[in-house]
Image (spheres, rainbow, N blue to C red):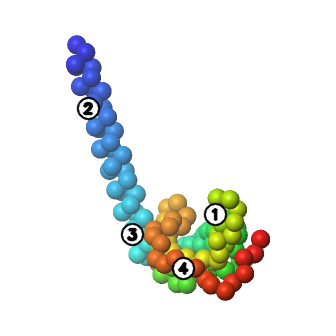
Amino acid sequence: MGDAKRFRGLREIVWAVAGLTIVAAVLWSIDSRSCATLDEDQDQVGSRDSALLVELDERCKRGGALPHECVAVGVEQCRAKVRVRERRGDEHGEALGTFETTLAMRYSPLLGQWFEVEVLDRKQILGLPNRE
């Protein structure tokens, strides 16, 4: 009797995982299709661009950068290349220097958000003073 209940519970878990996988695949498909036609709809382009400005503003504040130090280098459909300049310190609060990071970002029209895909480049900018 105990084995039957355990088997039934396992079967329900498998069905739940399969259902979630199907939902995720459908949402990904809709998101990808929306990206392909994004540039044709000016409202969607405006939403994408304003979401990117919000993301850049948040990254600037988090990294202690000035607004002009967080820029979108290029934007195409649902992809963007972003460059962020930030000051970094160690765990003791000692300044390590100024770093410039180039990121690949992806926009989700369904969620209206940008997500970091990967770090393309990270380098220290020598000769810049450390601001507090």
According to the picture, the residue beneath numbered tag 4 turns out to be 123
Lower position in the chain sequence, tag 3 or tag 4: 3
Q: Is residue 4 in view from this perspective?
A: yes
> Residue farthest to the top?
1
Residue 63 percent location from the top left of the image: 66, 68
Distance of label 4 from label 2 (alpha carbons): 50 Å
Q: Nearer the viewer, mark 1 or mark 4?
A: 1
According to the picture, the residue beneath numbered tag 2 turns out to be 11
> Badge 2, how many Cα within 10 Å: few under 14, some, many 20+?
few
Lower position in the chain sequence, tag 1 or tag 2: 2
According to the picture, the residue beneath numbered tag 1 turns out to be 90
The type of residue carrying mark 3 is: Arg
Would you identify the image quadrant in which residue 96 lies?
bottom right
Lower position in the chain sequence, tag 1 or tag 4: 1
Q: Is residue 42 in view from this perspective?
A: no
Label placed on residue 33: 3
